[in-house]
Amino acid sequence: MSDVPTAAISRLVTYLRILEGLERDAEGKPPTDPAHWVKSGALAAHAGVTAFQVRKDLNYFGRLGTRGTGYNVHVLRRELLRVLGLNQTWNVVIVGLGRLGQAITNYPGATDYQFQYVGLFDTNPALIGTRFHHLTVQHTDELAAFVQEQQVDMGFLAVPPEHAQEAAQALASAGVKGILNFAPVVIQPRTLERNGIHELSEEWRGVIVENVDFLAGMKRLTFYIRNPPLKDATTPEDTE
């Protein structure tokens, strides 16, 4: 499904969060209760998009709704979990156990989506051997062997900016295919030059890097505060 826009995937995550709330609201109500159903217009209102956009996003994955009735909340939530790969367990390591790394470790809710923290890594001698929850901080020198042994799927980078590239390289070299980077720097995959053409090195092929940059978000906010986006003049009619 490589043809699905990145923005659409981000919206699916938003829809999933909304559906979880709707499903909680419908608990204990009979199956025939309207609370078990949601139309694209209502889902759009919660998500801050148009009904047309909701239908377009969901149609990438087949026809999930019923004309005139809308979407069954439970069924749609289950389908979005499947589409996003959240119906399986994902093994995660955290590299960098400073204040941010510790906060991520303590953040509740990760296990609700099958994210399982299996390893913590740092280079600070003062942190090596300390425990957070049920995990002991290990030196990053042990990362490669650990990733292979535990079949780690993704790594969270919570290291200072000057160490982010090195830590990302260590994760990629170890075989991790997903990196969530909290450092405010752009990770540069290693490339090799062959016949004058730069190609990704073997360990970086298939590796996905997702950046979480708080400062970038704040900078975008200042722009939109000073330049408020115009609301859509019209909203496509909700037919589901």
Image (cartoon, rainbow, N blue to C red):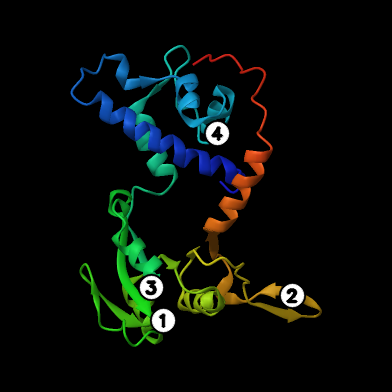
Q: Is residue 11 left or right of residue 71?
A: right
**Residue depicted at x 66% and y 44%:** 223
**Residue that mark 3 sits on:** 98
Q: Which mark is residue 144?
A: 1
Which of the 4 image quarters holds residue 37? top left
Nearest to N terminus: mark 2 or mark 1: 1
- Nearer to the camera, 198 or 36: 36
**Residue that mark 2 sits on:** 198
**Residue depicted at x 41% and y 73%:** 95
Type of residue at label 4? Asp
> From mark 3 to mark 1, how far is it between C-alphas?
21 Å
Q: Is residue 27 left or right of residue 75?
A: left
Q: Nearer the viewer, mark 3 or mark 4?
A: 3
Give the x, y percent position of residue 1: 56, 46
Which of the 4 image quarters holds residue 14? top left
Asked if residue 74 can be seen in this view, the reply is no
**Residue that mark 4 sits on:** 57
